[in-house]
Each structure stands twice: as C-alpha cells, then as structure tokens.
Image (tube, rainbow, N blue to C red):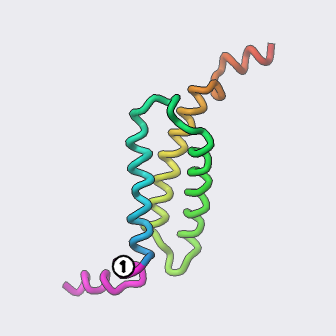
C-alpha cells in the first residue's frame, strides 16, 4: 500500500500531466502498429516524416524536463521505431530505396 501511495503522489504519478500525456500518446504507437498491415501505397510520406520529427523532438523534451519523464521517452522512442519502419515501407514502395533505380540513373 505504501508503494502505491508513493506512486500516486509522485511528481510523475497519475495526478499529473507527466503521466496522462504519455498514456494518451501511446495511441500514436498503437495506430502505427495497426497500419503495418495496410498496403504501403496508403502511407503518407509527409505525415510519417512529420511523426518521425515529432517523436525525436519529444524524446529530447522527455529527457530534459525535470523530473525526467521516462514514460514519455519510452512512448516516443517506440513511436520513432514504428514510424521509421512505416517510412521505409513508403520509401520502398515509391522507389526511393530501389537499387535498380540507382543503377539505372548512374548508367
């Protein structure tokens, strides 16, 4: 009971935005994971790129804010991995990572 009370009253506990902000942001990770089964033609390169930048910026924020928000950092690190994977799928589908295209351009 004492450990629950300590968590409940901590500066990053459920009484604060340090807790509920990251909880809400896990929705981005869930949405990205759900989108992995969709065809790569449905991926928006602009939006995926924006999500990559967004997650990088907020990973830094989560690390620099006091007290450090490890839950927010983990959330955005997870989202960064998911979005980079989605971005690679988009890039392959649009020929940006194709070796054949690179060879043809150099000849």
**Quick one: quadrant of the C terminus?**
top right
* Label 1 Cα crowd, 10 Å radius (few <14 / some 14-19 / many 20+): some
For residue 63, above or below residue 88: below
Q: Position of residue 37 (x, y in %)?
A: 39, 33
Extreme right residue here? Answer: 107
Residue at x 55% of width, y 63% of height: 59
Label 1: element kind: loop
Q: Quadrant of residue 20?
A: bottom left
Residue at x 77% of width, y 18% of height: 105
Tell which of 84 and 25 is nearer to you: 25
For residue 54, above or below residue 102: below
User: What residue span does the magenta drawing correspond to?
Assistant: 1-16
Q: Is residue 70 magenta?
A: no
Q: Position of residue 56 (x, y in %)?
A: 59, 57
For residue 86, above or below residue 72: above
Q: Is residue 57 left or right of residue 30?
A: right
**Quick one: quadrant of the N terminus?**
bottom left
Q: Position of residue 60 (x, y in %)?
A: 59, 65
Residue at x 52% of width, y 36% of height: 43
Tell which of 66 and 35 is nearer to you: 35
For residue 58, above or below residue 100: below
Q: Quadrant of residue 23?
A: bottom left
Extreme left residue here? Answer: 1
Q: Is residue 22 left or right of residue 100?
A: left
Q: Position of residue 34 (x, y in %)?
A: 38, 42
Q: Is residue 14 magenta?
A: yes
- Residue matched to label 1: 13
């Amino acid at each position: 009971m004492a450990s629950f009370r300590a968590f409940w009253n901590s500066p990053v506990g459920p009484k604060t935005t340090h807790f509920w902000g990251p909880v809400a942001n896990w929705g981005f990770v869930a949405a990205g994971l759900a989108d992995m089964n969709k065809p790569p033609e449905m991926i928006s390169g602009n939006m995926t790129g924006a999500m990559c930048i967004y997650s990088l910026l907020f990973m830094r924020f989560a690390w620099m804010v006091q007290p450090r928000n490890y839950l927010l950092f983990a959330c955005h690190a997870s989202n960064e991995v998911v979005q980079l994977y989605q971005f690679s799928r988009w890039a392959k589908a649009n020929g940006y990572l194709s070796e054949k295209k690179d060879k043809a351009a150099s000849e």
